Image: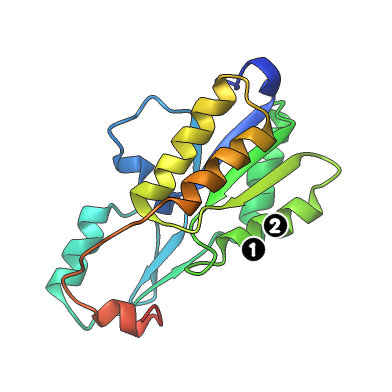
Amino acid sequence: MNKINKNNQNIKIASTSTSCLDYSPYKNHNIDLIRIKIFVNNKEYIDGETITSKEFYNILNENSNVDVKTSQPSIGELICYFRDLIKQGYKKAFVLTISQKLSGSYNVVCQAQKQLKDKIEIIPYNTNTVCFSEGYFALEAERLFSEGASVEKVIKHLDFLKENNTIFFIVNSLTQLIKNGRL
């Protein structure tokens, strides 16, 4: 794996799979994706691994009564992920998450941070957004770290983006948003 250089030699950048980096035209990034789980009629899928967005939307289009739920990664999965980073020689992990208002992912990363504080420095960052906007935050963090920026400088830049970020989206149906308590 390509480690970030200059002042941040041992930092790994990760983002939740809700960042849409799987579908980004910028494939030359070195950002790990922490996958959320998607449950369709109680069948578990791993976002971007065992189900693609196209397959997911096909399921929704075929049956409007389908029961869909999502779940953040478990604390155990994150602990395993961070232990793997430690084995690879990383000293820090900068983890960008989907908005804390939409998912518990940020909270789970914070739990892992507490459990592993003596082994790796985990820096959780709540983007307060989702989708390509979240992915842009991760790409910007990677760019700044590769230029040698400090964690503080990266956070300051991301905070600026957060304050000046607006995301618009259109949905075909409000059904799933209502079912899952998002509306």
- Disc 1 residue type (three-letter): Asn
User: Disc 2 vs disc 1: Cβ atoms closer than 8 Å?
Assistant: yes
Q: Where is residue 106 in the image (x, y as percent from the top left)?
A: 60, 59
Residues under labels 2 and 1: Cα distance?
5 Å
Left or right of residue 24: residue 108: right
Q: Which residue is drawn at 54% across and 27% down?
A: 144
Left or right of residue 146: residue 177: left
From the image, which quarter does the C terminus lie in? bottom left
Whether residue 48 can be seen here: no
Residue identifier under label 2: 110
What is the quadrant of residue 109 in the picture?
Answer: bottom right
Q: Which residue is drawn at 61% across and 32% down?
A: 12
Q: Measured along the vertical axis of the image, is residue 112 above or below residue 32?
A: below
- Disc 2 residue type (three-letter): Cys
Viewer-nearest residue: 64 or 155? 155
Count of numbered circles on the image: 2
Residue identifier under label 1: 107
Residue 167, numbered circle = none
> Dot 1: what SS?
helix
> Dot 2: what SS?
helix
Q: Where is residue 1 in the image (x, y as percent from the top left)?
A: 55, 22
Farthest-out residue, right:
118
Left or right of residue 91: residue 51: left
Whether residue 41 can be seen here: yes
Q: Where is residue 34 in the image (x, y as percent from the top left)?
A: 51, 48
Q: Which residue is drawn at 66% across and 30% down?
A: 11
